[in-house]
Image (cartoon, grey):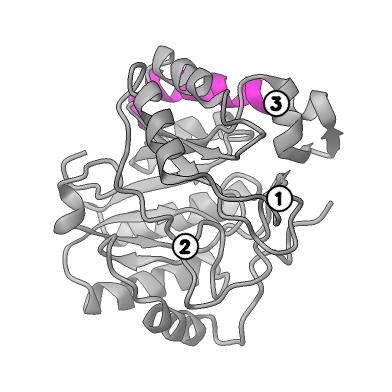
Amino acid sequence: MNTHPCFNAEARHKYARVHLPVARGCNIQCRFCNRKYSCVNESRPGVSSAVISPAQALEYFNLINKIIPDVSVAGIAGPGDAFAAPELTLETLRLIRSNYPEILFCIATNGLNIMPYIPELKYYGATHITITINAVDPGIGERVYAWVRDGEEIYRGYEAARLLSLRQLKAVEQLKQAGFTVKVNCILIPGVNDTHIESVAQAAGRLGADIFNCMPLIPVEGTEFENLTPPSPKLVFDIRQKCGQHIKQMYHCQRCRADAAGLLHENRNAEIKEILDRVSKKKREPAGMACAN
């Protein structure tokens, strides 16, 4: 954790990360998520100016390493889910590992489909996993998720939330048993899960997760929650204090884009967009296009 800027607050001042936007589609639909629109002036999870292939990701990583010093982490954090199309994630890891044997690998996922790939993640040397868990009570989860796709089956309502929650909690348990460093993200949605987040933190801590990141909702146009009022700083602080009784808290999150690069506090979105566009050899490919019901 000493050189991972997201898992270690001190490391963020020196070590840079690069997110490789190779995850095209998603296997769940959160009611707060819309990846179709990406402005270089915004910083929020799930947006990217382009989606690239694993081979292009290696080329992109090579270019980034020439202009950004002290890159310690290669991450996959969207714009879709890393295990909706796991072959893309694993091929990216293989290519980067074969050229950069010392780099840390960090994967962000909703946790629905990660468990079958834990042995391969270990094989390619991934060490840090982030799972976003917004509820452990399906009655609350069904208010957060519109649908969940498991293989060819699409689930909705309570059953969708129940399936996702069971998979997520089991994934945290198995990842810790396999020796991974695990961070749990949780989106604070006022009026939906705000009184429930401590229960999520308690479950994460009980399963051995290393750090918990309570992230305030960013209302996004075109989503069911676009008209919700973001939580106040005081509410965020109070909930983090309660969660801190159960698990270490993250306080320095910058709500990184799926194509972020550099130090956490840097905004290099315009520069990154230019490089991504050059690597992808095409005009912008909206990040949400591959996510279909």
Q: Residue at x 45, y 22 (%)?
A: 201
Q: Secondary structure at mark 1?
A: loop
Q: Which residues are magenta?
A: 163-181
- Given this view, does label 2 or label 1 mark the residue nearer the observer? 1
Q: Which residue is mark 3?
A: 140
Q: Residue at x 25, y 72 (%)?
A: 65
Q: Is residue 83 left or right of residue 225?
A: left
Q: CA distance from mark 2 to mark 3?
A: 27 Å
Q: Quadrant of residue 291?
A: bottom right
Q: Badge 3 local density, few (<14 within 10 Å), some, or many (20+)?
A: some
- How many marks overall? 3
Q: What kind of residue is marked 2?
A: Arg
Above or below, 200 against 218 in this view is above
Q: Is residue 209 visible?
A: no
Q: CA distance from mark 3 to mark 1?
A: 15 Å
Q: Is residue 13 left or right of residue 237?
A: left
Q: Residue 7, position in %: x, y?
A: 28, 41
**63 within the magenta span:** no
Q: Residue at x 52, y 26 (%)?
A: 197
Q: What kind of residue is marked 3?
A: Ile
